[in-house]
Amino acid sequence: MSDNMSYLGVKRCGCAVAVVFDNPEHAKDVRETVAEFMQDGLTIERVSRDVAVDRLSRDCSHREESRP
């Protein structure tokens, strides 16, 4: 199941600005990347790859930088 999942980094406005694909072979790297997203003030959402790609393709119209 994790082969098709990802972790999105989402700003307070709801816009997705970062993603890491869940890969059990690189679990440590995935954890470190998610931790970086959290340190940057992003909320983490676990979603399918398709949802992640769709949400990242949308521009943030809230005039914030791409990463807080």
Image (cartoon, rainbow, N blue to C red):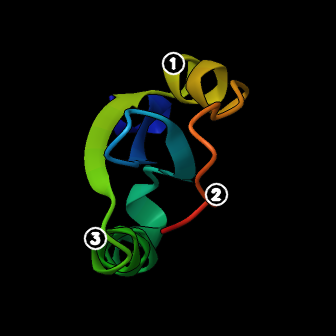
Compare marks 1 and 2 and give the one earlier in the sequence. Answer: 1
Q: Amino acid at mark 2?
A: Ser
Residue at (38, 33) in percent of width and height: 14
Q: Amino acid at mark 3?
A: Met
How far across and how far down the image is residue 45, in percent?
A: 28, 39
Q: Disc 3 on helix, strand or loop?
A: helix
Task: Name the residue nearer the viewer: 63 or 26.
Answer: 63
Which residue carries the number 2 mark?
A: 66
Task: Name the residue nearer the viewer: 12 or 62.
Answer: 62
- Per the model, the C-alpha gap separating discs 1 and 2 is 19 Å
Q: Amino acid at mark 1?
A: Val
State the image quarter where residue 39 is shown.
Answer: bottom left
Which residue carries the number 1 mark?
A: 51
How far across and how far down the image is residue 43, in percent?
A: 26, 52
Which residue carries the number 3 mark?
A: 38
Mark 3 or mark 1, which is nearer to you? 3
Q: Residue 32: which disc?
A: none
The vertical placement of 17 against 15, above or below, is below
How many neighbours does mark 1 have within 10 angstroms: few (below 14), some (14-19), or many (20 or more)? some
Task: Name the residue nearer the viewer: 18 or 64.
Answer: 64
